[in-house]
C-alpha cells in the first residue's frame, strides 16, 4: 500500500452501547496495520449510550484513536454517519470511510484487506466486508 492512508470508521449507535464497545475492541486489534492510520468515531443518536461508550473509551485508553459524539437528535443511520464524517473531515484528512453497525466485530486484517483491495482497483468506488457468524460460517 502506498504511504500512510487514513481510515475513519464511523459507528452509529442507538441503545447498543455493549455491542459498540465490543466493536471498538475488535477495531483496536486493527491499529497495527502497516501503512494505515485508523480512527473510530462513534455517534450516539441521542439514545443515552453516550456516557457508557465515552467512559469505555476513556477507561480502556482508546481516546488516542476513538471518540464518541452525541447527536442532538435521533435522525437515523444516515444522519449519524453524516455527523461522523463531518467531524472526521474537520479534524484530519481521510483516505477511506468505513461505516459499520455497532454489532460488527472485525476479523484480524479486515481493514487492511479492504484498503488493499481499493488501492489495487482504482475503478471501484465502494467495497465492504463479508458477513459471518462468530464461528466463521456464512
Image (cartoon, helix red, strand yellow):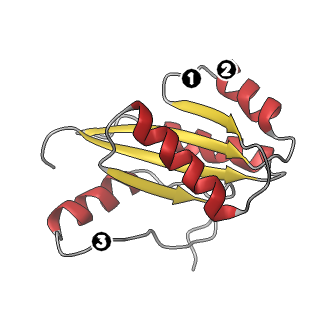
Q: Nearer the viewer, residue 42 or 108?
A: 42
- Mark 2: secondary structure: helix
Structural distance between the alpha carbons of marks 1 and 2: 6 Å
Which numbered circle lies on residue 76? Answer: none
Extreme residue toward the bottom, this view: 138
Q: Do the numbered discs 1 and 3 sit on residues whose CB atoms are within 8 Å?
A: no
Left or right of 59: which side holds 52? right
Q: Is residue 52 above or below residue 89?
A: above
- Report which residue position mark 3 lands on: 125
Q: Residue at x 79, y 55 (%)?
A: 74
- Report which residue position mark 1 lands on: 63
Q: Is residue 63 above or below residue 82?
A: above
Q: Nearer the viewer, mark 1 or mark 3?
A: 3
Please tell me how crowded label 2 is: few (under 14), some (14-19), or many (20+) other residues with Cα within 10 Å: some
- Report which residue position mark 2 lands on: 58
Q: Do the numbered discs 1 and 2 sit on residues whose CB atoms are within 8 Å?
A: yes
- Mark 1: secondary structure: loop
Q: Residue at x 33, y 61 (%)?
A: 114
Structural distance between the alpha carbons of marks 2 and 3: 34 Å
Report x, y in % for residue 79: 64, 58
Q: Is residue 18 above or below residue 129?
A: above
Report x, y in % for residue 94: 34, 44
Amino acid at each position: 500500500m502506498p504511504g500512510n492512508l487514513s481510515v475513519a470508521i464511523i459507528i452509529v449507535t442507538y441503545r447498543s452501547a455493549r455491542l459498540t464497545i465490543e466493536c471498538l475492541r475488535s477495531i483496536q486489534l486493527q491499529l497495527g496495520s502497516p501503512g494505515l492510520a485508523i480512527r473510530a468515531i462513534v455517534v450516539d443518536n441521542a439514545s443515552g449510550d453516550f456516557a457508557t461508550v465515552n467512559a469505555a473509551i476513556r477507561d480502556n485508553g482508546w481516546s488516542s484513536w476513538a471518540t464518541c459524539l452525541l447527536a442532538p437528535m435521533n435522525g437515523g443511520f444516515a444522519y449519524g454517519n453524516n455527523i461522523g464524517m463531518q467531524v472526521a473531515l474537520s479534524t484530519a484528512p481521510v483516505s477511506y470511510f468505513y461505516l459499520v453497525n455497532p454489532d460488527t466485530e472485525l476479523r484480524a486484517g479486515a481493514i487492511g484487506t479492504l484498503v488493499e483491495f481499493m488501492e489495487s482497483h482504482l475503478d471501484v468506488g465502494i467495497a465492504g466486508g463479508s458477513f459471518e457468524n462468530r464461528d466463521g460460517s456464512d
